[in-house]
């Protein structure tokens, strides 16, 4: 491959609000990545609206999520829990940010989400997503080429992926401690492109819930459940 054929990475500059994005990383680096992306979205929407956490039953322990202030939290065990979460999301004040912890929501959930305006979905896992509905996928700087080839090949196509020279890109990514992102957000080509991004962007603000704040959240969730007929 000639030097002219190699595609150079640019910095990612698109806003994330009203998109479906997924974060991938090791268990040690994933929390910071998720917090920074969520903080960027909070800034983009001016901290307005609601922020919702959905956790699937049996998900790995993620106590760090409880250091983020949520307006509602749902543990998804079955279709009834899923319906409760969707009911809240549909009726809650917009813009709304929904974080789906440790995996990917079902197509049923996504089809309902896509009917809502000003709704952002953020999923995350230690493994790359399998579903095609994601608009952007963010990886931490410690990702290895073997974990990138399959998900990127399915999205970019093998011939385009080869032009990025992944091994060289990852060497630079690791040295600079920046992240890698595939994005189709506002791209003219539906296959999207690769970019680098600053994983520290957003300077997330964290704090533990006070007892009053925790009580208010639980009360709001209880009220939303009670209103469902």
Image: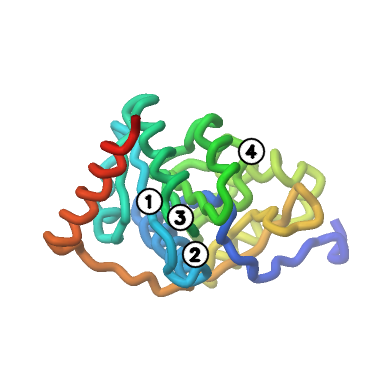
The Cα atoms of the two marked residues, 2 and 1, are separated by: 13 Å
The Cα atoms of the two marked residues, 4 and 1, are separated by: 23 Å
Q: Residue at x 72, y 59 (%)?
A: 186
Residue 52: assigned label = 1
Q: Which residue is mark 4?
A: 132
Task: State which quarter of the image contains the C terminus.
Answer: top left
Foreground: disc 4 or disc 1? 1
Q: Secondary structure at mark 1?
A: strand
Q: Residue at x 31, y 42 (%)?
A: 224
Residue 76: assigned label = none
Q: Secondary structure at mark 4?
A: loop
The Cα atoms of the two marked residues, 3 and 2, are separated by: 8 Å
**Closer to the N terminus: mark 3 or mark 2?**
2
**Closer to the N terminus: mark 2 or mark 1?**
2
Q: Which residue is mark 2?
A: 41
Q: Nearer the viewer, residue 72 or 134?
A: 72
Q: Residue at x 30, y 32 (%)?
A: 57
């Amino acid at each position: 491959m000639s030097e002219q054929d190699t595609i150079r990475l640019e910095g990612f500059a698109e806003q994330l609000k009203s998109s479906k994005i997924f974060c991938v990383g090791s268990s040690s680096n994933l929390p910071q990545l998720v917090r920074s992306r969520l903080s960027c979205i909070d800034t983009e929407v001016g901290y307005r609206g609601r922020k919702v956490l959905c956790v699937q039953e049996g998900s790995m322990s993620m106590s760090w999520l409880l250091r983020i202030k949520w307006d509602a939290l749902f543990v998804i065990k079955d279709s009834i829990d899923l319906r409760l979460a969707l009911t809240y999301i549909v009726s809650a004040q917009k813009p709304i940010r929904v974080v789906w912890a440790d995996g990917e929501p079902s197509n049923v959930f996504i089809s309902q989400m896509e009917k809502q305006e000003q709704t952002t979905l953020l999923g995350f896992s230690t493994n790359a997503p399998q579903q095609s509905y994601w608009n952007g996928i963010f990886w931490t700087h410690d990702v290895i080429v073997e974990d990138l080839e399959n998900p990127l090949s399915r999205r970019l196509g093998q011939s385009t992926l080869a032009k990025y020279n992944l091994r060289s890109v990852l060497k630079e990514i690791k040295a600079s401690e920046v992240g890698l992102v595939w994005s189709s957000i506002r791209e003219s080509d539906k296959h999207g492109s690769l970019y680098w991004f600053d994983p520290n962007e957003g300077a997330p603000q964290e704090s533990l819930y006070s007892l009053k704040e925790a009580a208010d959240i639980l009360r709001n969730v209880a009220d939303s459940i009670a209103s469902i007929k």
